[in-house]
Amino acid sequence: MTDLYKACLSRAEELLKSGEAARVVGWKKGEFAYDPSPAYFERVEELKDFTYDYFCGSNLSKYLVQIAKKEGKTAVFLKPCDTYSFNELVKEHRIPREKIHVIAVECRGKADIEKAEKIAGAGVKEINDTNDTKTLEIVTRSGKKETERLSVLLTKCLACKGKEHVAADEKIVLKEPIETGSDRFADVEKLEAMTPAERYAFWQKELSRCIRCNACRNVCPACTCVKCVFDNPESGISAKANDTSFEEQLFHVIRAFHVAGRCTDCGECSRVCPQKIPLHLLNRKFIKDIDTKYGEFQAGEEAEGKTPLTSYKEEDGQ
């Protein structure tokens, strides 16, 4: 039980006991240590299932769209990257800011269970900090193993866009953030260096694994339409399975266009994909192009203002 977990749990208890918040949105323990899930807690007794550790990679901002409709104030734990999504949802009037109490919580990157098991074997119970910021300790049923921090982090954490919270009503930060030093657009540039035929083959191979489970859409903070076009039976593309290779590409390309300029690059789409399709690369390509054509812009950095694709200036590039 880490000091950070204790601090988060204690604050959640205080908010519920005092009535400052009607509920607290956080992470709930799963069947295994590595599968916590987003949840909200309305009674102190329910907090026995609350957790916060290296496996709490879920971006909780999306869940506020529905939870904030409930009576009373909602407190939520948000990691630095989550606060960008939160701001974007506030900007789009999907979340009423006055009904949310943001607890900005410390994050030093979140772990990928598959990477952890590959390094330390099955039966991972927890991952802990060591005295060296460059390493982490993986605890399994059979023992402990120290490994390089970057070797076990989620892909999205290896190119973190911001270590500081851009929205907060209070903070629980006990340790300084850790830089990963990765180039956020390095993989995009590798794709850009390919020939059109090579790039087409790459995406055809990746997208052919799509099973249309809709996990990427459902978890995406930028996808909050009441009725998604892909759920419209009149569209001809509402089937769960892809009828043709064209349809499987259509789903992801259209979704990327829909979130362009609003995607904060939280990386949730790739994290939840059961087929491990690097969907975040589509979004990062849009982000890179927007930066090039309209000037550097980070969606969600502010809770006000327009995005480059919803504003126009005469000097904008063609």
Image: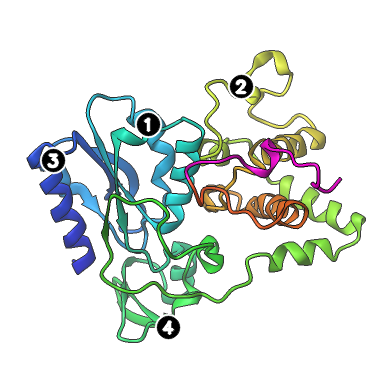
The residue that mark 4 highlights is: 134
Marks 1 and 4, the one that precedes in the sequence: 1
The residue that mark 2 highlights is: 231
Query: Looking at the image, is mark 1 or mark 2 nearer the viewer?
Result: 1
Residue 300 pos. (x, y %): 52, 48
- In the picture, the disc for residue 96 is 1
Q: In this view, does 161 lie to the left or right of 78?
A: right
Report the residue at 83% width, 48% height from top.
317
| Residue at the far front in the pictured view | 314
Q: Is residue 142 left or right of residue 218?
A: left
The magenta region covers 303-318
Which of 6/278 is in front?
Answer: 6
| Residue 221 in view in this figure | yes
How many residues crowd around disc 1 within 10 Å: few (fewer than 14), some, or many (20 or more)? some
| Residue 31 in view in this figure | no
- Per the image, is 57 magenta? no
Amino acid beneath label 3: Leu
**Helix, strand or loop at disc 1?**
loop
Marks 4 and 2, the one that precedes in the sequence: 4
For the residues labelled 1 and 2, the Cα–Cα distance comes to: 26 Å
74 over 193 or under it: above or below: above
For the residues labelled 4 and 2, the Cα–Cα distance comes to: 45 Å
Query: Looking at the image, is mark 3 or mark 1 nearer the viewer?
Result: 1
Amino acid beneath label 4: Lys
Query: Looking at the image, is mark 3 or mark 2 nearer the viewer?
Result: 3
How many residues crowd around disc 2 within 10 Å: few (fewer than 14), some, or many (20 or more)? few
Marks 3 and 2, the one that precedes in the sequence: 3
- Per the image, is 314 magenta? yes
The residue that mark 3 highlights is: 16
Look at the image and tell me in which quarter the C terminus lies.
Answer: top right
